[in-house]
Amino acid sequence: MPSAEPSAEASPAGPSPSPADSTGDCIVITGLRKRYADAEVLRGIDLTVKRGELVGLTGRSGSGKSTLLHIMGGLDRGYEGKVSLLGQDLARLSDRELAGLRNRHIGFVFQAFHLLSHLSCLDNVLLPNAFATEPLSRREAEQRALQALERVSLADKKLSRPSELSGGQKQRVAIARALLFRPEVLLCDEPTGNLDDFTGQQIIDLFGELNRDGLTLILVTHEPRVALATTRLLQMQNGLIHRGQNGGLDGRSPAEEPSR
Amino acid sequence: MTLRQASSLLLHSLRRAPRSFALSVFGIAVGISVLGFFLALSLGMQKRVLQRIFPTDRLEVVPPKTSVDDSAIGALGAMLGGSKLLGDEMIATLRSHPDVQAVFPRMKVAFPVRGWGGERLIGRAIYTDLPIDGIDPAAVSETTSPWAFKDYVSDKNPFCTEDKNCPSGWYCSWDINKCEPPIPVIVSPTILEFYNGSFARMYGLPKISGFLAGQLRGMTATAELGKSFISRREAGKPRQRKIVLVGVSDRAQPFGLTVPLPYVKRWNAEYAGDRMAQEYSSLTVQVKPGKSITRVVELVRKLGYSIEDNGAEQAGLAVLLMTALFVLVSLSTLVVAALNVAHTFFRAIAERRHELGVMRAVGASQRDIMLLLLGEAACIGLVGGVVGLLISRLAALGIDFLSRTALPDFPFKPSSYFWFSPELLLTLLLFSVTICLLGALFPARAAAQQSPAEALTAK
């Protein structure tokens, strides 16, 4: 199994401003293994996610689904195997290149929202622009941020602090932040885990809308109703994708063969 | 991350925990204020007090001093004609040294002189014996009109029998029947300091300020050569000469009057013999700007002459030791402050782990995180440095005020004991920022190198 330790050097070409995979694959993972101390968390994952899919990743706690999501999004390195996102081999990217990829092409939504409490909703949504290698002008960035807040129906809360929002509103601000640069893929880790049923359903509906607009989504969840909203559902067990099946939303996606 | 983005994020970060920011700033400000206070005090003492009393850019070469043990050998040497004369040969040797800018010979009057005058200053004449020495007129540049500090005696001086035969301001020296202007005299600022600090207070006399010192220029008195109020000893044929104060100069001898060298040479030849007109009492050696006196001192000692010990070395050493002690105390305060900054950053980074993880997730590189945290540290250093310097400046102003109002006058009392030079202020600010950057470096590096996934999932 080839090692995929982070490369200190930048890849010769570096990530293109708008990476594209001619095959239409958004994410391609082969032979992925990940070990923490003595425990092997991922034990050889092979997975392909097509552009426009809404993939659910379920499994019991400790099955490795969050780790897999973090590795897909370039948040975790030091694995064996190969992970390609939008045609870029993540292990070959330098820290700056990987940061640029996360900034422009990947959006993240977390269970704990992770909004910065000292910033307004608008400034939270604008945060990715602060780290962009080619940042938008303040005016353009604010326009985009407002559009993103409108998309999640929170434009009227733009000056509110996160502490003034409900859980559902916080998660929608987090989604707006993830959408600022109109990414190709949205990676969500238990996005409804801290929300009540009604609010959770609103978030699931929003994901459906985003997916219909062409956004590729991968949702880590153990909630059955979220699973039902996916186009493909993958079950993880003991660091392996145990089985794949069509999700409940529609049958657009070809069924994935189980990795083992 | 552009500078504008970085500064905006920086401001947000600093505003999120104002108490922690203020505490770190306070720690640094205390250290910098103590360091700034003592460094400025040390510089001030050296520049405003010590250099006035003990100039460090010149030295006084004197004939060899013999200890008690070898005085007999010295006396024997002198008897055999081997004693070292401080004469023109030595002047030439010193002038050829690359570090020497100028050498000014000085000669003491080797016979009694007494004088009287000073009515313009205190309303009645003072009678006293006068210690007089002569110095090369080229050494003195501080004199002003009406009289230059030079030798006015010449064969061309007009013949006279009384004062009215002479040009305005000149008088008739009746013993030689020649017109002469008064002999120009300079005095040392040391005399004025001691007059103001002791004499004027003791006798209720007016103090001599810079303005009054200017007014005193042109004040005349009478000197009588070859006579003394203290001793009955007389030398040669006593004669009276008028003297005029032409300036205040640190080239003048500390206690006494200084006149142009040719006068003393002529007088010594007449009243004390030829040898006393050839041997200088000392040579003032001025070193070139930026050069140290050390190499010249070595040469002088190698040639067998001595350096007049004016206490400068010991005083300078005492100030240096005191400064070193205070700087050590201040530095230890700053080390504690830097550790405090490091501790604050470690704590803040642990508290902000999720926040930093989110920044990484939305596109911050390790370098961005490092720059952000170091930027915060630099802000603490800059604000702490400015506050610290303000505190030390205020403390210095307070002490100067107390000195002016509560302390009695004393010789060389400065208007300020401190010297806050622009270089010192800049250095301390840079030092403050550097200390904070060093304190924050390790925590910032650890935070930047942390995996984003780890940061986001940390409990």
Image (cartoon, rainbow, N blue to C red):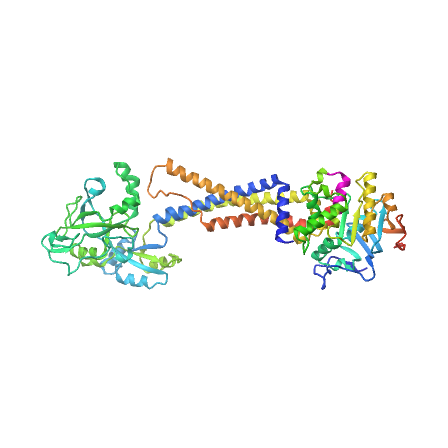
A104 vs B290, left or right, is: right
Q: Is residue B257 above or below residue B405?
A: below
Foreground pick, B108 / B66: B108
Q: Quadrant of the N terminus of chain A?
A: bottom right
Q: Is residue A172 magenta?
A: yes
**A71 lies left or right of B336:** right
x, y (%) of residue B63? Answer: 28, 56
Magenta region: A165-175
Query: Where does the image place residue B438, in percent across and percent down from the top left?
Result: 59, 49
Q: Main secondary structure of the magenta part?
A: helix
Q: Image check: A156 left or right of B120?
A: right
Q: Quadrant of residue B165?
A: bottom left
Q: Residue at the location (55% across, 45% down)? A: B383
Residue A64 showing in the rendered view = no
Residue B103 drawn at (x, y percent): 30, 59
A247 w.r.t. B201: above or below: below
In this rendering, position of residue A182 left or right of residue A245: left
Name the foreground residue: B186 vs B80.
B186
